[in-house]
Image (cartoon, rainbow, N blue to C red):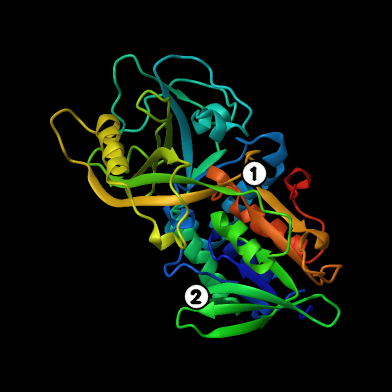
Amino acid sequence: MSNNNTVVLGAGIIGCSTAYYLSESPRTQAQSIHLVEASPELFHCASGLAGGFLAADWFAPSVASLGLLSFNLHKELAEKHNGKEKWGYSRSTGTSLSQDNDTVGGSGEDWLSNGASRAEAAGIHQFEGGEGPAWLTRKKGESLEVISRDETVAQVDPKRLSQFLLDQCLERGVQLHHPAKAISVSKDIRDQLASVRIAAADGTETDIPCTRLVLTAGCWTPRVFSTLFPSAKTRIPVTQLAGHSLLLKSPRWSAEHEEKGCHAVFASDNLGFSPELFSRIGGEIYISGLNSTAIPLPEVSTDAKISDEAVQQLKQVANRMLGLPGQEDLEVLREGLCFRPVTNSGRPIISRIPDNKLGGGFSTRGGGEGGVFVAAGHGAWGISQSLATGKVMSELVQGLPTSANIKALALP
C-alpha cells in the first residue's frame, strides 16, 4: 500500500469522484487523500447547479469511451447504493422540440462554438414522434421527436450525487479542508514536489505533505495552477461559460405520466437561446440554456451575481414552454448561476502535466508515486462524465492503465 499523500484541489463532483475511486484502491490509504475546497459553500457551482442529464452515446469519438464508461458507472453506482432514492437517479427520454422536422447534426465537439443546442451538436438522429411530457406546452407548428435510444440517457440531481460521493469519501477517512485555498507548493532536496501549503478562512496556514497533486477546480483550475507554479510557461487552456438556470415546479408534472422515467427536452433557438429542460424525480423541472462568456469569473463561486434580466428571460421562456394561457402557476424553487469549464476544442483535459511544464525546477516522482495532474474543461458534460473522469484520474495517479481511452484528452 502506498503512503504517498494525494492532494485534490477542488471538491466539486470531479474532485469528489477522483477521491471516491482513489479511496477504493487497496494501493492507497484513504487518510492520505486530501480534498481542498476554496468556496465557502460546497457544490455552489456546476456540481450543484447543473441540469444533471446523463448520456451514453452523445459524444464525439475523442470522448466516446469516457462518456460510455461514465454512463455505465452512474448506473452501477445507483444500483449499488439506491441512487433513485438518494440522488434521484432515473432513466430518461431525450426529445427535440423544433419548428420544423429537420434532422439534427453536428460534430459533438462544436456545441459551444456554434451556439446550437446540445442535441444538435451531438449529431444524434430522430427516431419517432412522441406526445412528450405532460408538463410541456405544445404550440402549433412545433414538432417533438424522440432523439434517444432506450436506456441510453438518464437523470440525476447533481448536488445530491456530489454530496453522496463526498460523504462516502469522508466515511472512508478522506480528509476535507474547507474552506481553504492552496497558496504554494514546496519541493524536497531532490527538487521533487513535497507539500502543498493551504490557507484556511481564519488565516491559518498548513503544509500538507504531497507527492501527487490533482487539479480539479473547474473554471478556477488555470488560476490554481498559475498560483502554485508561477514560473511555468504552460497555461491550462480552460475558460468559463456562465449559465443561468431555474428550478421549478409545475402542477402539470405527473408522477404517473413519468413512472417510466424522466424527460429531457432540447428546444431549437427561436427564443433568443436554445432552452434545455429536464424533469427530475419528485416533480422538479430544471430549465437552462441561457449562456454567456462575458460574465467574469468571480474569486469564488459564492461571489457570483445572478442577473435579474437573465432570470426574467428564463421565466418568460418557462411560462411559454410550461405554462398555460392566463395561469401563473409555475413555482420557482431556485435561481442559479454557475460557471462551466470549457476548452476551445470542446474536449476536457484529463492528463498528467509533464514535469518540464511545471517550471521552477520542479520535478515529481514517477511510477505512480507522484505527479501533477489535471481534470477540467468538461463543459456541459461535467456531471455526465464525472464518474469516469474520477475513475481514470485515480488510475492515472496510481500509474495504472486507464479504463477509458483518454489519449485525445492530454494537456496540449
Quadrant of the rendered structure where residue 124 is?
top right
| Residue designated by label 2 | 178
Residue 77 is left or right of residue 43, and the answer is right
| Residue designated by label 1 | 67
Q: Amino acid at mark 1?
A: Gly
> Which residue does the image show at 20% across and 30% down from the upper left?
324
- First in sequence, mark 1 or 2: give its number: 1
Residue 238 is left or right of residue 166, and the answer is right
Q: Give the secondary structure at mark 1.
A: helix
* Residue 105 circle label: none
Q: Position of residue 172 (x, y in %)?
A: 60, 77
State how far apart marks 1 and 2 are (Cα).
Answer: 30 Å
Q: Position of residue 188 (x, y in %)?
A: 80, 81
Q: Position of residue 326 (x, y in %)?
A: 13, 30
**Callout 2 environment at 10 Å: few (<14), some (14 to 19), or many (20+)?**
some
Q: Amino acid at mark 2?
A: His
Residue 127 is left or right of residue 140, and the answer is right
Q: Give the secondary structure at mark 2.
A: loop
Nearer the observer, 353 or 35: 353
Q: Position of residue 215 (x, y in %)?
A: 64, 62
For the N terminus, the image quarter is bottom right
